[in-house]
Image: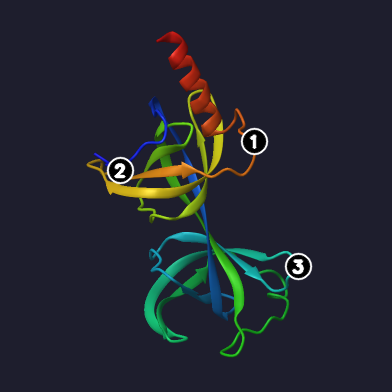
Amino acid sequence: PMIERRQAARMQFVQPGVGSLRLVQDVQIARLGSHHAVVIVPRQLQEGERLLLEIWVAHDAKPYTVLVHVVSNQLVMDEGSLRWQARLKMVQPVPRGGFGGVHVGPDRRLIGALIRRVPVRVVEASTAGCVFESPFAVNEGTVGFLQTRTATHDCSEAVRVRRMSETSDSAWAYRMAAEFLTLGPVSLDSLRGLATIMSVGSETTS
């Protein structure tokens, strides 16, 4: 069982809400070609995983977005620190005309972002946070956008992972406790709003 301090009463879903956690990771693009890209990342990527790579060529222009999969990882010394260098293969063709003639080399890198969607199922929720399970580990401190569907609601919420533990379920091997991040008024279409309704209903009927 996960040991943690709870800020609010937590409701358990009879039928877990299944959805995804959208994660965005900033990267430096060290090499960029028509079929491959090499990026510098703080943590090792999972080989074979499919990701979206956003390539920012100018501050005032929309980024190029291409689907890639991770080919390999290599630990390298970069600017005096040990970091991971990941080689990505592009799954879809590059835009016609390439990436606007942008040159990437030792003296010039591009800023980019890797976007991944991790499958999750939400098993508990409160007005302060939630607990979800996933086949993949999500590191503590990670910030993402949780989108899920329960039996009655399509819900969305910005979250920060606070704790992670392993489960005995081979399909949903990891359990994460996350706090909700306040980005605006509470919506009834959010997990926080759903938990509020459940909490009021529970207090009324008890």
Q: Which residue is mark 3?
A: 61
Tell me if 67 is positioned left or right of 2 in this view.
right
When the figure is inspected, residue 169 is found, relative to residue 59, above or below; the finding is above
Q: Which callout, 2 or 3, points to the residue nearer the camera? A: 3
Q: Looking at the picture, how far across and down is residue 173, in whole percent?
A: 29, 46
For label 3, the SS is loop
- How far apart marks 2 and 3 lie (CA) works out to 41 Å
Q: Which callout, 1 or 2, points to the residue nearer the camera? A: 1
Mark 1: amino acid: Pro
Front position in the image: 124 or 99:
124
Tell me if 1 is positioned left or right of 140 in this view.
left
Q: How many discs mark residues in the rendered view?
A: 3
Residue positioned most to the top:
205
Q: Which residue is painted at 68% across and 65% down in the image?
A: 63
When the figure is inspected, residue 191 is found, relative to residue 175, above or below; the finding is above
Q: Which residue is painted at 61% across and 33% down in the image?
A: 186
- How far apart marks 1 and 3 lie (CA) works out to 31 Å
Q: Which residue is painted at 43% across and 16% down in the image?
A: 202
Mark 1 is surrounded, within 10 Å at the Cα level, by few (under 14), some (14 to 19) or many (20 or more) other residues, namely few
- Going from N to C along the chain, the mark reached first, 2 or 3, is 3
Mark 3: amino acid: Ala
Placement of the N terminus among the 4 image quadrants: top left
For label 2, the SS is loop
Q: Which residue is mark 1?
A: 185
Q: Which residue is mark 2?
A: 171
When the figure is inspected, residue 72 is found, relative to residue 174, above or below; the finding is below
